[in-house]
Image (cartoon, rainbow, N blue to C red):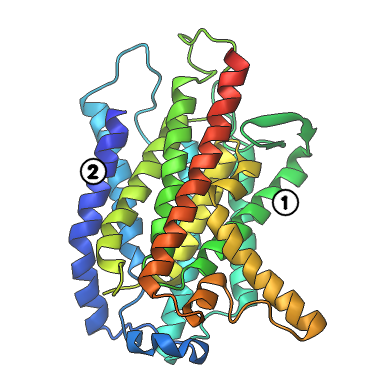
Amino acid sequence: MRAVVIASAVAFLVSLLATPLAIRAFTRLRAGQPIRAATRSHLPKQGTPTMGAVVIIVATLVAYIAGHVSLAVWPLPPDQIVQVGPSMTALVLLGLFVFCGAIGFIDDYLKVRKRNSAGLSGRGKLLGQLLIGGAFGLVALNFPSTAGETVASTTLSFVRDIDWLNIGQVGAVVVFIFVVISSTNAVNLTDGLDGLAVGTSVAVLGAYLAIGFWQYRHWCADPGYTLDYCYAVRDPLEVAMLAGAAAAACIGFLWWNASPAKIFMGDTGAMALGGLIAGMALATRTVLLLPIIGGLFVLVTMSLIVQVVSYKTTGRRVFRNSPLHHHFELAGWSEVNIVIRFWIIAGLCAATALALFYGDFLAATD
């Protein structure tokens, strides 16, 4: 737990202190956020520096290194298993985090350069997500640890692997790609109001911090663990450390991103956080639990799908505007009210998922 706390503290401080430097740097570079004509109420935000999630990514990477340095300097008791140094799980999670963030960075850069909100084409984003999801999916399903565990599984999972839902390696890679694409785009759609996506990501990452640490304390690979019920996962402490670091980095960034935002995280952050969250769902064997943990992301995404389908089939709009947060803007809610109420929903979704996860453990150990 000490390494998780140190990583989280370092990520928070780096993000909190480095974000003002990023604000000044991106302002000098004129990296201002273009605003779509469809969101005229946001026109006062035109020119606010974007791509700020570079700070979140850097802070998380620095914090991960700091966490492992702490393990090398102050080793855990010999009865606790921990790997000092990068693991395959960290390679996959950080790879998804950085490379999905790179897609978003390219998108943000093109928006700033062209001075409009078009950015990278939808096909370009999808191709990048397919390649990244496929590449890291193959890595995650191969290269087992000495205990025989891979980062991801060929079996679908809810609160743990569902043994009778084995889909094979090809099916597992397809699921890996689907989860990455779904998660990155869901976070991106939610990133429409100051602090909304960042705050929601804190709730989701906080849930994965709890899940990862709980799995570490009840890990099948631990020779000192005596209960029959354990979690057959790989490197759960790494998941907890990265989840804590990323959540803390988001909190530090939120200090400056809360309304009225002095900097936006941009697609750089939405794509990066979406990729990281997808990887954590796959690494913790909670793929089918992800829609509950990230329930707000699902709600926002579904509002857009319902709006498009309704308009294409009947010519009528269900919402005043979509995604859902824009509907409530047009209904007269203030931006701060929408964000805080959506955060509450995100927290309730994460808490519900944790209750299901922990309830399964209690039921199995009674």
**Figure disc tally:** 2
Where residue 141 appears, as percent x and y from the top left, is 64, 39
Q: Which numbered disc covers residue 9?
A: 2
Sequence-wise, the earlier of marks 1 and 2 is: 2
- Tell which of 85 and 47 is nearer to you: 47
Residue drawn where x is 43% and y is 68% of the image: 338
Q: Nearer the viewer, residue 244 or 357?
A: 357
| Disc 1 packing (10 Å; few <14; some 14–19; many ≥20) | some
Q: CA distance from mark 1 to mark 2?
A: 36 Å
Viewer-side residue, 334 vs 274: 334
Say which mark, if any, is on residue 174.
1
Q: Quadrant of the C terminus?
A: top right
Check disc 1 and give the amino acid type. Answer: Val
Report x, y in % for residue 12: 25, 50
Q: Secondary structure at mark 1?
A: helix
Q: Quarter of the image holding residue 233?
A: top right
Quadrant in the rendering for residue 289: top right
* Mark 2 Cα shell of 10 Å, populated few (<14), some (14-19), many (≥20): some
